[in-house]
Image (cartoon, rainbow, N blue to C red):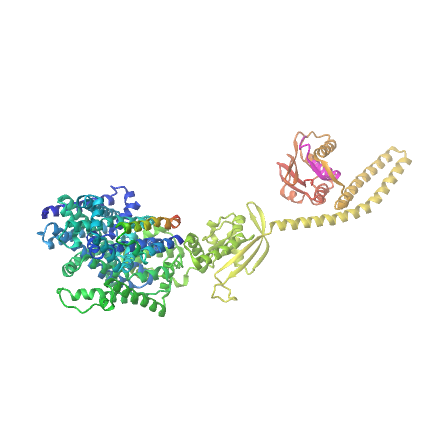
């Protein structure tokens, strides 16, 4: 369960906090929001691994 | 480029035909069932989240609000990160209690029909604009391809096709246990079409409009304001509110709930969907900015909402344009089909059935339900069409989508209460939802109605304008705040009903299994006519049989406890058909429980324990600690060195610990749950007799078992319930303790035997002394007479006297030896080799039985030694071998085997003579016990042997059977 909260916290930090302004800047590559998104998606199976085992 | 109306119609028809074939092939199992059950199909079917709002509207959203459109999918990603906490428990409840919609879930949790009605009405209100949005998107995109197509005909034709598909493939089965595999595969197929259409369009944009990825980058570099607008608009927009709205929509939208939970075939697929669905949506959305920028570069003159179809048209390829159009059709049709299916179930279960009740029992209930849902589907689709004609032309696609999202978000407080707050109650839920719905109506719907028909009318500032916030932030936060505050406030100041308390505990996993009841009916056959009054004979028969099959209950079953489980199962199965509240009403009225026969606490404890064992990994916090404590106490009970069994007042075995298993030979699994009468003999009579007796303690109860007789000391204690007086004679059960005292009993026997021997020894010593002296005198006098007299006749008689005195002396000497046997200080112990001792004893016996030819073998290692008084040990062997010789016939075999094992030396003397009965065997060590003829033995040999062996701290066991010979096993401690 800890992993889920860790990944959720990390995702919330990236998506809800002022950090959004860091990856949503015009001077950065346009596809950066998608890279941020896919990083979160990659972490989901890791966060759920132990739960799946049950 | 214009596409002919016929071409567009035919291609749409062909697409829907393919969709029908795909669904039909899955339904008929022409497609392997593994396709429908594959996690990828499940993920693709969840792509129903992406409607025309995503397909067309996202580009329009991106053009006005930049990357804000991504928040609609990022919120869903956040929800799926928490899927094990949010969605898995809902899936568990849906599967376990046969719930089919979010209205069912709330009606089940809050045990309130009002809650179900409110949720259904509000979902209908929130979803109809969304359905109209789909119809509008298909109609307008078709009109872009051919402006001459009459929009009314087109939209009505589209609606008719959707109704036909939904009726054919969405309502084939009434019970949620039977999944619509055809529907699931068809919706997955539609996801593939819309994904392909968007990715191909993005590919076309990059290659044909920008001339490759470098061209795209170059165009962006030369138009920095485009990217600047995309990022800054996202910042300034309602980013967080849309994240919250899409978080809720991810699993609470009717179509999402239906595909995620109701049509879920394998719970494990949810784990795959947690990353698979966000990934699918990422791929879909990857195309959005590219299409937007390509449309800007291509300078398309149309609303940005339709850049997707415009760009496809711009390609000049009719085929491509039609394919992209079909992508839009697939997005719209999937949403309408699944949403109306979900809404139809909710409407029938929570609006129609409570209003008009169950149909006439003479009518087929299943057919009634099926057609009821079909008619509702048609009404809903055409209501969406009517809404489209009345409202939708005045709003952008995104506006309508978000209105729906804000409506659905009103279920969030209820879901939190359902899963995590068992104190929440129906008053709180109803008040919160009503408050949130009113806020939603006032903030979002009222302004829409005000502008109805007069889009240019001067309207007063809206509430969000007055608050200085954007529309979505204000509407989301205001409605959810009102909802949440009322929910908590009313839950705190009002009380839960007992049924609601139980449902709350079940939902929050504080209670693993519902409290079970006993039913007032006598057998499953009586269930059918009872239910037939409400459901009709055919449905009642089918439902009772189905529940019987589920639980493997026979027609002859009469146990009211088992019938209670059957009743519970019927209620669950009916819940899937008619909703939890109506199902509960039907079952409560038709299959009444016997309040006097509540399942006793003790048996409920066992049931709870079973469920706790199965759900251990799901427990957390205080529950996990309490479970750890329960396990500790359970372990103490299990490991107790005495047998413990608990019996409920009705005679059900509730606990049966490890020692009970070992002494009774009855496995725990067989004993638990069984009735006392079901136990094998002698346990059932033994326990029952003890429970019925007034004694609380029985000392040394003899229990004949197959393995031999054992002795138990029994104790019992009546267990009191928490609210029972300590002095009350009745309780929730009785615990019986079985203390195995067989070994103690045997030791006591041995002690008594030794005591007896000692007392006989003292007596023998006295007798030897008192008889020995006169006999010696008689012998001396007889010898004197023999010397003095020469009469041969008299001398012969004197010889007789002397022989008798020798015989008396022998007996006296044996008595003296026997009496001295316990004087251990007289023992002259030392180590000596065993084999020579055995050989000497054998030789002595052989000599004394000269007339008998016995085959005597000695099998003893030469180096085997024992420690003791050699002479006395030799006496032991002589005594035993003498008996063996006496019992054997000439030519028989007598074997002596000696071996050393851990800490002891074991000597076995085996003969194959006439043996002894059990009665004699048991008394063989008693003094003066003999089976020989008078004068042939004193009966002291084995008693003396026993004594000598005990003096050497050894043991002796005799095993004999008439006709089978005798085996004597002697053990001595190994020399130190």
Residue at horizontal 56%, vertical 45%?
B707
Q: Is residue B859 magenta?
A: yes
In what quadrant of the picture does the C terminus of chain B appear?
top right
Tell whether B975 sits left or right of B485. Answer: right
Return the residue nearer the eye: B729 or B658: B658
Q: Residue B257: x, y in percent? A: 28, 55
Say which quarter of the image contains residue B502.
Answer: bottom left
**Furthest residue to the left?**
B148
Tell whether B429 sits left or right of B336. Answer: right
Return the residue nearer the eye: B278 or B741: B278
Highlighted magenta segment, given as a residue range: B855-882
Q: Is residue B103 magenta?
A: no
**Furthest residue to the front?**
B222
Return the residue nearer the eye: B8 or B204: B204
Say which quarter of the image contains residue B336.
Answer: bottom left
- Judge whether B908 appears above or below B702 on screen: above
Tell whether B84 sits left or right of B691. Answer: left
Q: Residue B382: x, y in percent? A: 16, 57
């Amino acid at each position: 369960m800890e992993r889920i909260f860790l990944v959720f916290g990390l995702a919330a930090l990236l998506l809800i906090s002022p950090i959004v302004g860091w990856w949503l800047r015009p001077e950065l590559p346009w596809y950066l929001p998608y890279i941020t998104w896919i990083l979160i998606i990659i972490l989901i199976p890791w966060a759920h691994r132990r739960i799946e085992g049950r | 480029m214009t596409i002919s109306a016929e071409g567009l119609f035919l291609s749409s028809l062909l697409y829907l035909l393919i969709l029908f074939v795909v669904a039909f092939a899955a339904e008929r199992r022409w497609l392997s069932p593994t396709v429908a059950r594959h996690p990828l199909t499940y993920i693709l079917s969840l792509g129903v989240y992406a409607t025309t709002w995503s397909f067309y509207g996202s580009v329009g959203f991106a053009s006005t609000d930049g990357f804000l459109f991504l928040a609609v999918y990022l919120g869903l990603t956040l929800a799926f990160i928490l899927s094990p906490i949010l969605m898995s428990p809902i899936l568990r409840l849906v599967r376990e209690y046969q719930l089919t919609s979010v209205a069912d879930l709330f009606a089940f949790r809050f045990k309130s029909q009002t809650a179900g009605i409110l949720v259904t009405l509000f979902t209908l209100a929130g979803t109809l604009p969304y359905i109209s949005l789909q119809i509008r998107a298909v109609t307008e995109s078709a009109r872009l391809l051919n402006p001459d197509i009459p929009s009314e005909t087109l939209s009505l034709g589209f609606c008719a096709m959707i109704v036909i598909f939904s009726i054919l493939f969405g309502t084939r089965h009434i019970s949620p246990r039977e999944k619509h595999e055809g529907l699931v595969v068809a919706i997955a197929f539609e996801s593939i079409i819309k994904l392909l259409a968007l990715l191909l369009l993005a590919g076309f944009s990059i290659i044909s409009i920008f001339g490759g990825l470098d061209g795209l980058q170059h165009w962006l570099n030369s138009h920095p304001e485009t990217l600047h607008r995309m990022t800054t608009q996202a910042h300034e927009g309602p980013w967080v509110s849309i994240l919250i709205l899409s978080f809720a929509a991810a699993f609470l939208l009717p179509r999402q709930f239906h595909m995620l939970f109701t049509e879920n075939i394998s719970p494990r697929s949810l784990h795959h969907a947690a990353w698979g669905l966000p990934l699918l949506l990422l791929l879909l959305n990857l195309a959005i900015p590219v299409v937007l920028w390509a449309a800007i570069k291509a300078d398309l003159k149309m609303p940005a909402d339709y850049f997707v179809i415009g760009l496809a048209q711009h390609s000049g390829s009719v085929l491509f344009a039609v394919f992209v159009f079909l992508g839009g059709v697939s997005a719209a049709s999937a949403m309408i089909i699944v949403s109306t299916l979900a809404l139809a179930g909710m409407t029938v279960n929570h609006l129609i059935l409570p209003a008009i009740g169950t149909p006439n029992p003479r009518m087929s209930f299943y057919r009634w339900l099926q057609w009821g849902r079909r008619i509702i589907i048609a009404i809903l689709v055409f209501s969406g069409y009517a809404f489209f004609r009345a409202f939708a032309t005045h709003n952008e696609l995104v506006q309508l989508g978000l209105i729906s999202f804000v409506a659905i978000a009103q279920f969030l407080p209820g879901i939190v209460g359902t899963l995590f707050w068992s104190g929440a109650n129906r008053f709180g839920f109803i008040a919160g939802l009503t408050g949130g719905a009113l806020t939603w109506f006032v903030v979002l719907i009222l302004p829409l109605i005000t502008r109805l028909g007069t889009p240019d009318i001067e309207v007063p500032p809206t509430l969000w304008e007055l608050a200085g916030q954007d529309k979505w932030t204000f509407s989301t936060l205001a409605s959810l705040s009102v909802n949440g505050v009322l929910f908590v406030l009313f839950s705190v100041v009002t009380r839960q009903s007992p049924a609601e308390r139980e449902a709350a505990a079940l939902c929050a996993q504080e209670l693993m299994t519902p409290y079970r009841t006993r039913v007032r009916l006598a057998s499953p056959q009586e269930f059918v006519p009872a239910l037939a009054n409400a459901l009709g004979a055919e449905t009642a028969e089918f439902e009772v049989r189905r529940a019987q099959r589920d639980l493997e209950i026979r027609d002859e079953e009469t146990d009211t406890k088992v019938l209670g489980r059957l009743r519970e199962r019927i209620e669950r199965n009916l819940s899937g058909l008619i909703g939890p509240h109506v199902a509960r009403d039907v079952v409560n009225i038709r299959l009444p429980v016997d309040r006097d026969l509540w399942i006793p606490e003790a048996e409920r404890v066992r049931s709870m324990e079973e469920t706790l064992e199965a759900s251990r990994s799901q427990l957390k916090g205080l529950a996990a600690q309490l479970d750890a404590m329960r396990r500790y106490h359970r372990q103490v009970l299990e490991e107790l060195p005495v047998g413990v069994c608990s019996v409920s007042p009705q005679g059900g075995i509730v606990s049966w610990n490890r020692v009970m298993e070992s002494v009774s030979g009855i496995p725990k699994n067989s004993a638990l749950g069984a009735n006392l009468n079901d136990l094998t003999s002698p346990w059932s009579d033994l326990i029952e007799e003890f429970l019925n007796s007034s004694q609380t303690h029985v000392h040394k109860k003899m229990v004949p078992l197959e393995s031999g007789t054992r002795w138990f000391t029994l104790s019992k204690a009546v267990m009191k319930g928490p609210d029972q007086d300590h002095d009350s004679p009745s309780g929730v059960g009785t615990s019986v303790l079985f203390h195995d005292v067989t070994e103690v009993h045997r030791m006591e026997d041995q002690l008594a035997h030794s005591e007896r021997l000692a007392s006989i020894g003292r007596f023998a010593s006295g007798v030897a002394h008192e008889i020995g002296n006169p006999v010696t005198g008689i012998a001396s006098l007889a010898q004197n007479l023999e010397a003095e007299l020469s009469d041969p006749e008299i001398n012969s008689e004197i010889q007789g006297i002397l022989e008798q005195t020798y015989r008396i002396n022998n007996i006296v000497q044996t008595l003296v030896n026997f009496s001295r046997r316990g004087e251990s200080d007289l023992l002259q112990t030392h180590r000596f080799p065993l084999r020579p001792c055995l050989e000497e004893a054998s030789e002595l016996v052989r000599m004394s039985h000269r007339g008998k030819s016995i085959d005597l073998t000695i099998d003893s290692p030469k180096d085997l030694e024992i420690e003791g008084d050699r002479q006395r040990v030799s006496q032991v062997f002589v005594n035993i071998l003498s008996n063996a010789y006496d019992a054997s016939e000439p030519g028989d075999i007598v074997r002596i085997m000696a071996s050393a094992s851990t800490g002891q030396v074991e000597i076995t003397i085996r003969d194959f003579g006439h043996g002894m009965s059990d009665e004699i065997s048991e008394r063989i060590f008693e003094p003066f016990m003999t089976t020989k003829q008078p004068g042939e033995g004193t009966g002291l040999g084995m008693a003396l042997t026993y004594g000598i062996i005990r003096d050497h701290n050894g043991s002796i066991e005799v095993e004999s059977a008439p006709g089978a010979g005798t085996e004597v096993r002697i053990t001595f401690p190994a020399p130190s």
